[in-house]
Amino acid sequence: MKKPELLLPASSPEVLKTAVRYGADAVYIGGELYGLRAKAKNFTNEDMAESIKFAHKYGKKVYVTANITAHNRDLEGIKAYFKELSEIKPDALIISDPGVFELAGEFAPDIDRHISTQANNTNWMDYLFWKKRGATRVVSARELSIEEIGEIRKNTPDGPEIETFVHGAMCISYSGRCLLSNYFTGRDANLGACTHPCRWKYYLMEENRPGEYLPVFENDRGTYIFNSKDLCMIEHIPELVNAGIDSFKVEGRMKTALYVATVAGTYRRAVDDFFESPEKYFDNLPSYRESISKCTYRNFTTGFFFNKPGADAQVYDNNVYVKDAVYYGTVAEVTKDGIAVLEQKNKFLVGDILEIMHFDGTFDEAEVLDITDEDGNHMPSCPHARQKIFVKFSVAPAVGELLRGKGAAEAEEQ
């Protein structure tokens, strides 16, 4: 069996470095144009060049999304963009639009082309169609079962590669091709500007009583009838591998470094354990379940992999993430004296116990012994977000490792 690639998202160069350090084999990112996450920080061309250099130093790959549904007005700009990317040289472009696919072949001919899930790739003939036109990989539609993916692999033994989402947010629409945002707000999801109306609370209106809104109650918070749980396949690595999937993809180009580190580290450990010994993987299942929950998530489902999702795949009573851990910062430097230098993300105090997330998926509990600012002043806590601080821990962390702690009792509104 071939060990699948572990593919993580990144919203910024800092998050890309986190993904690489915590075990991603490849990272997918968006430029400032033509991707489906217009509200993400995204990467300038200079950011891309530096990030690709960093990833390649570690033997990792970087893929760039260009997966909008293009209009006529976009085509000239896309040509210029692909010319620029041909100089930056990412490892692949992720594309859904056939016209954009052709332009990539013409203006960035040396870069591999992957077909996005937005192209609704649901059968093995789709895969052969794209292979004949030069695609090296096709991302399966989220609506496919394990059995269907295995049948695709059986009928495409010589490629293209199969990439499949295994973790992250699910969309109410067919593989993300949603029109609700455009209809309600004029912001087109297929151009990267989705307002996520699937997370909103809705009312009913009866045809003969216009203007009379009928509330739909599951409890006193209302009912969020389109709000899907998050996909999580950490307990089903064997089935995914046996289906012949080449790349395990994680959703989340707008998520935090804590999310990326937690998910990358957990899946990295699970995949490696399975290939070392299936018994080791099954013995460690409880630890994977515990680990994957130490970031924000919206409860978990296995999506379409084993059957068509029913009512239990939705979260009807709220539109919040569960927040089981707080992100305190990433270690930027460690001095000769073992002092960790970081830009703090959330407040903590001297005497608090924080978790140091190691790159191998393990963690250490470390007491905060001392905090000083840039002028050497000792502080009982670090109350100012994004302040540069110097922290002495009972256990010294390494450069690039993340610090986390127990989450607040309330969930984080999204």
Image: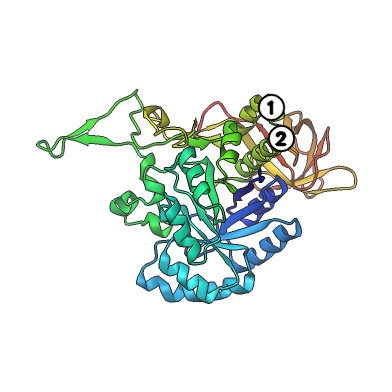
Residue in the image at 54% along x and 51% along y: 162
Give the alpha-carbon distance from disc 1 to disc 2, as whole Å.
Answer: 8 Å
Q: Position of residue 60 (x, y in %)?
A: 70, 56
Horizontal arrangement in the rendering, residue 36 relative to residue 271 (left or right): left
Residue in the image at 72% along x and 28% along y: 280
Q: Quadrant of residue 393?
A: top right
Name the residue type under label 2.
Answer: Asp
Q: How many marks?
A: 2
Q: Position of residue 342 (x, y in %)?
A: 74, 47
Horizontal arrangement in the rendering, residue 4 relative to residue 338 (left or right): left
Between disc 1 and disc 2, whose residue precedes?
Answer: 2
Horizontal arrangement in the rendering, residue 14 relative to residue 396 (left or right): left
Q: Residue 284 has which mark?
A: 1
Q: Residue 323 has which mark?
A: none
Name the residue type under label 1.
Answer: Asn
Whether residue 251 is visible to the viewer of this picture, yes or no, is: no
